[in-house]
C-alpha cells in the first residue's frame, strides 16, 4: 500500500470515529442557574443505561461523552460507556442533595 494512501485512510478513520458525544434536552421551564452533575454508567454502547432520579425538577439536561469516557469505551470495546450528566434545575425547584449528585 502506498504511504500516501495509508495516511489518507488513517486520517479518514480518525476523523470518522474520533469525536465527543453531547445531547441536550431543554424544557420550557425557567432556569434557576443551579446545576448538579454526576457520572452515569451505560453498558453495551449505551443500549443499557442506569436510571437516576433527578434531584430537582429539571429545566435542562445535558449528557456528554468526553475524552476520558471515549477512551474508557474504546478500551472496554463499548461494554462500559461512562457519561457525564448535568441537570440545571428549574426556577423554584431546590435540589435535594444526596447520593452522588454534586452541585456545580
Image: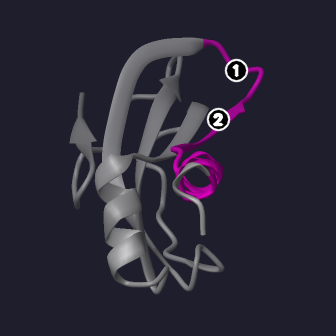
**Residue appearing at x 70%, y 20% in the figure:** 29
Instruction: Tell me the SS state at disc 2.
Output: strand
Front-most of residues 45 and 99: 45
Disc 2 or disc 1, which is closer to the eye? 2
Answer few, some or many: residues within 10 Å of disc 2's Cα (few below 14, many 20 plus, some between 14 and 19): few
Mark 2 vs 1: CB contact within 8 A: no
Which of 35/24 is in front? 24
> Is residue 76 at least partly visible in the picture?
yes
Per the image, the residue denoted by label 2 is: 24
State the CA–CA distance, disc 2 to disc 1: 14 Å
Q: Quadrant of residue 74?
A: bottom left
Q: Alpha-carbon neighbours of circle 1 within 10 Å: few (<14), some, or many (≥20)? A: few
Indicate which disc, 2 or 1, sits on the residue closer to the N terminus.
Answer: 2
Q: Does the magenta segment cover residue 29?
A: yes
**Going by the image, does 33 lie left or right of 63?**
left
- Would you say residue 95 is visible in this rendering? no
Name the disc covering residue 74, or none. Answer: none
In the depicted structure, whether residue 94 falls above or below residue 79: above
Q: Is residue 44 magenta?
A: no
Q: Residue furthest right?
A: 28
- The magenta-colored residue range is 5-30
Rendered view: 72 above or below 62: below
Task: Give the x, y percent position of residue 19.
Answer: 53, 45
Which disc is residue 29 wearing? 1
Give the position of the C terminus as an image quadrant.
top left
Residue 54: give x, y in percent of width and height: 48, 51
Instruction: Tell me which residue sits at (64%, 50%) in the image.
Output: 12
The picture places residue 8, in percent across and down from the top left corner, at: 61, 48
Q: SS for tag 1?
A: loop
Q: Quadrant of the N terminus?
A: bottom right
Quarter holding residue 36: top left
Amino acid at each position: 500500500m502506498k504511504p500516501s494512501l495509508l495516511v489518507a485512510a488513517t486520517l479518514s478513520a480518525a476523523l470518522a470515529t474520533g469525536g465527543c458525544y453531547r445531547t441536550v434536552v431543554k424544557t420550557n421551564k425557567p432556569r434557576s442557574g443551579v446545576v448538579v452533575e454526576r457520572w452515569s454508567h451505560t453498558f453495551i454502547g449505551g443500549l443499557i443505561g442506569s436510571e437516576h432520579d433527578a434531584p430537582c425538577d429539571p429545566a435542562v439536561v445535558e449528557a456528554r461523552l468526553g475524552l476520558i469516557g471515549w477512551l474508557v469505551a474504546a478500551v472496554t470495546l463499548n461494554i462500559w460507556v461512562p457519561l457525564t450528566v448535568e441537570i440545571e434545575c428549574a426556577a423554584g425547584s431546590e435540589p435535594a442533595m444526596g447520593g452522588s449528585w454534586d452541585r456545580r
